[in-house]
Image (cartoon, rainbow, N blue to C red):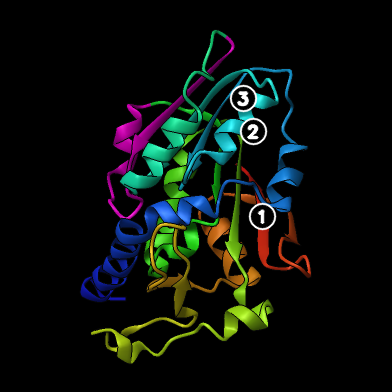
Amino acid sequence: MDARTASELLEINRRFYSEFGDAFAATRRRIQPGVSRVLQTIPVQSASDWLDLGCGSGALGCIWAAQNRQGSYTGLDFSGPLLREAEKVTEGLSGEQLQIRYVPGDLMDPDWPAVLAGRKFDGVLAFASLHHIPGKENHLRIFRQVHELLKPGGTFIFSVWQFQNSPKLMQRIQPWSKTEIDAGELEEGDTLLDWRHALPENKEKQGLRYVHLFHEDELKEIAEDSGFEVSDSFYSDGAEGNLGLYMILGN
């Protein structure tokens, strides 16, 4: 994918989260069943340092504190409205045993790890965020950067949307003619979806989001090319339990 097309796809999502960030945050105040399943695999008693890429509005940070976890939880997101919500809902939850902090960062910036000031982590999470990244070369770069951020024996756990399993979401696919993007420059799996939600005080209006539909074999190839080994994978979320694909990788 050329740089211009990737930039145009990113602009769709930047505009969406700028205009709809508050409404989106209102729909993401509970964690998904797949995330709950993942948390059961992470020991609570031992102190560890975790990074959450695309942390959103702070729902996971609240759960992290509620489970009396020790160490540190760092959330990273490029959306100002979502970060403000995250800071608000987790205010006062940090203490001697657990440090919660948030940092602005864009995974499409090749130097995004610099905002972490050289820190290393026991684990990195990325729930429902990687499918907003355009271009296979960017997917591979981010996986390799995550590998470098992990301590020896660290874990990378992520999920990606499997909207093809939802008839309702499939009806929300929009033609690329609604944008200025040349569909011929896109990669297989690149999709434009609409969004229909508003806060009670606002009128509903349509937004557009770019999503890349990952296939399991595609992700396994990227993981292996980045130095990871696939420890586990499973489907969860949604009415049929198959709206998200989760993968657990070890370094």
> Which residue is at a point 43% across and 64% down the rendered structure image?
132
Check disc 3: other Cα within 10 Å, few if <14, some if 14-19, many if 20+. Answer: many
* Number of the label disc, if any, that sits on residue 247: 1
Q: Is residue 247 above or below residue 114?
A: below
Where are the magenta residues, as a range?
A: 97-118
For discs 2 and 1, the disc positioned in front in the rendered view: 2
Screen quadrant of the N terminus:
bottom left
Which element carries disc 1, helix, strand or loop? strand
> Which residue is at a point 66% across and 83% down the rendered structure image?
167
Q: Which residue is mark 3?
A: 65
In contact (CB < 8 Å): disc 2 and disc 3:
yes
In contact (CB < 8 Å): disc 1 and disc 3:
no
Give the image location of residue 94, x and y in percent.
51, 17
Question: Is residue 117 within the magenta segment?
Answer: yes
Give the image location of residue 40, x and y in percent.
77, 37
Q: Which residue is mark 2?
A: 63
Is residue 231 visible to us here?
no
